[in-house]
Every structure is written in C-alpha cells, then in structure tokens.
Image (tube, rainbow, N blue to C red):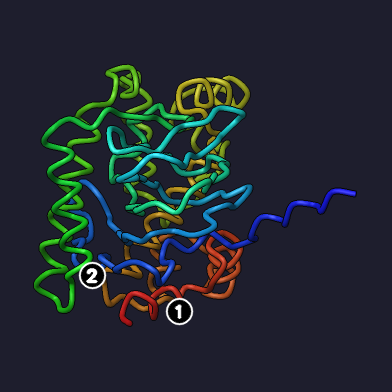
Amino acid sequence: MATPSPRPLARDYRDPHTRLGIDLTAFSGAGASSFLLHECGFLHYENWNHRGILSPYWRLHHNFETGNAVRSDGVEYSLDPDSVVMIPNGITLDTLGRETVPHLWIHFVPSQEFMLAMHRPVSLSADRLMRETLRALRHDIESASDNEPRRSLHHLAKALLHFAFSRLDPSSFQAYPDRLVRLLEHVETHLSQALSTPALARVAGMSRHRFTDWFQRHTGLTPSRYVADLRLRTAMQRLATTESSIEQIAEDLGYANRYYFSRVFQKSLGCGPATFRRGQRE
C-alpha cells in the first residue's frame, strides 16, 4: 500500500509580513507613492508548497533558477530566471515548490489599484533591465544590515515594480467612464461617511439595481466590497506610515468604533491593528 503524500503546509497569508524578509513599510510615505511596499525577501525555499493562499495585498515572485510555479484557477505560471509573476490581491493560488531554488518576492499594494482590471496572475518576460534590477535587489537583500541598505532596497523594489507595470498589456489598465471615475474619487475622499450601496447609487444618479450591475461590470466588485477593500488598504497604510491613533483611523475611515474596526481588521489580516502596527515598528 502506497504511503500517502504529506499534506501541504497550512499558513495564514493575510499578514504581508512573513518575518522571513525585510520590512520596507517605513520607507513608503503615506499617499506619496505609486506603491506601498510591505516586504521583500530572498531565500532558497524548501518545501514551498501551500494551498489556497488568499491575500489582501499584491505579490511579485521571481526564481533565479527553474523548477517552481504558482497555480491559480487551474493554470500554472512558471517561475524562472526569464520572467516575473505578479498576483493581484483577492486571487486564490497554490505555490508549487518542486525544487529548492533561489526565490525573490515583494509584497505590496499599488496606490492606483482601482485603475487595473487584473483578475488573475500575469507572467511577464524579464528583459535586461529587469534582470539587472532583480540581481541588484537580491544582492542588497543578502547584504542588508542597517537602515541605509534598506533605503536602497526600497528604491530598487519600486524600480522593479515600475518595470513590471510598464510591461503589462495595455488592456490591463481599464479606462473607466467619467461618471465612475468621479464616483471613485468621491469614495476615496469620503471614507469617513456612510458609503452604502443606496447612498452611492444616489451619488451616481442611478437606481440601486442598475447602479450595482453597472459598478460590478466595470470594477469586478460589488460596491460594498470595493468600499470595504479600500478602507482596509487605507487603514494598513495609515497604521504603517503615520502616528494617528487607532481610534482616529477608525473614525476617519468610517468604522463605527475602534472595536468594530479591530474585528474587521483581524478577520481580514489575521491580526489586530495594534499588532499590525507593532510589526512595522519592530
């Protein structure tokens, strides 16, 4: 009788800080950057086999040797020296660690994420500039020991992300109708207020049913899901990059109180806001 294969490791991937990489959040200024960088890292991963990963942040993966892959919705995306794979938030994936290979990753959130229409991982060819940046990033991660190399890491990681985003197919960037752009701007600047679906439908000048269909057709999300995700991303950024109290953040982002905010944050990230902030400072 054959010995059953070991079950894949189970881990919680809601917190972008694995403690295996280098925390770069402190160098990402609130509201002043194309990307909020949480972590980048480099390891010779052993047994990189996990199932059902679902994260509220984006990922970039690269292997300096062939052998491993990520899988989403039945499609495998190979990790090798000639490509990088980017995975948007909210996408379920499996990691397939068939070999122990040198692996680099970045956990981040694009500040203009709502302008992207990516609903699956994407594999991008790594040209000479990207490969040089990947090698430089690997070198700095391996030699980082104080704040100055980390600042260099921050710039290199952002450069790599800019290279990757510049190589996305134009269809990945969605031109929304002017009415929707104005509505999204309204949401972003009124997070402290009630942003229920009926309220947003009134702002858009539509019936609730028509508005919900219209919004979901263009964004791929229900209005309530969009607002909840934006509030959570903004909370993560403010916890990481400002000294605002948790009570003030909760009030500014439209949560009923700190305790409700903490429950929502715990459910989404796997830790409370105070623990999340402490992780940045450590």
Kindly identify the residue that appears in the image at 28 percent across and 46 percent down: 111
Instruction: Say which residue label 1 marks.
Output: 274
Taking the spot 17% from the left edge, 38% from the top edge, the residue there is 130
Tell me: residue 280, above or below residue 238: below
Task: Mark 2 or mark 1: name the one nearer the start of the chain.
Answer: 2
Q: Spot the residue most to the right.
A: 1
Q: Is residue 142 above or below residue 177?
A: below
Q: How far apart are marks 2 and 1 (CA)?
A: 16 Å
Q: Position of residue 169 (x, y in %)?
A: 29, 20
- From what the image shows, is residue 202 above or below residue 61? above
Residue in the picture at 24% in, 33% down: 165
Q: Compare residues 43 and 116 and report the one nearer the observer.
A: 43
The C terminus appears in which quarter of the rendering? bottom left
**Would you name the residue on which mark 2 appears?**
26
Query: 10 Å neighbourhood of mark 1: few (<14), some, or many (≥20)?
Result: few
Identify the secondary structure beneath mark 2. helix
- Asked if residue 158 lies left or right of residue 224, the reply is left
Q: Which of 260 and 74 is in front in this view?
A: 74
